Amino acid sequence: MAWFRDDEQDLQQLLEEARQAHREGRSVFVARLRSKHGKTNPWAAPDAAELIEGVEREGWGLSHMAESLAGDVVPQMTCVFRRRQS
């Protein structure tokens, strides 16, 4: 799971997991993304976009996404990525 804000280490870990899953030939990669501070702009989510773009650079394409609240206060996105056909 990666946190949206202020945590480059979590972002790098998520990207490494995506890279490893791709190397292993997996066909699906699931990432759960949360906002640390529970503050999100309802019209734009540049932090989420950065994470999605990073995973897509590792050979995945975003297939589905769902939003929910973790513990009734922390926004969370579950993103399902599928391996891109080369």
Image (tube, rainbow, N blue to C red):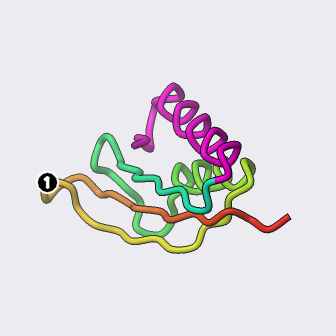
Residue extending farthest to the right is 86
Q: Residue at x 59, y 56 (%)?
A: 49
80 vs 20: above or below: below
84 vs 51: above or below: below
Q: Residue at x 66, y 41 (%)?
A: 19
Q: Can you tell which quarter of the image residue 67 is in? A: bottom left
Q: For the residue carrying disc 1, how many other residues have a C-alpha within 10 Å: few (<14), some (14-19), or many (20+)? A: few
Residue 44 is left or right of residue 41, and the answer is: right
62 vs 24: above or below: below
Residue extending farthest to the left is 72
Q: Residue at x 40, y 53 (%)?
A: 32
Residue 45 is left or right of residue 53, and the answer is: left
Percent across and percent down for residue 53 are: 67, 54
Magenta highlight: main SS:
helix
Percent across and percent down for residue 70 are: 21, 55
Percent across and percent down for residue 60 are: 68, 58
Magenta-tinted stretch: 1-25
- Magenta segment includes 81: no
Q: Could you tell me which quadrant the C terminus lies in?
A: bottom right
Q: Can you tell which quarter of the image residue 73 is in? A: bottom left
- Magenta segment includes 11: yes
Helix, strand or loop under label 1: loop
Q: How many marks?
A: 1
Residue under numbered circle 1: 71
Q: Can you tell which quarter of the image residue 40 is in? A: bottom left
Amino acid on which disc 1 is placed: Gly
Q: Could you tell me which quadrant the N terminus lies in?
A: top left
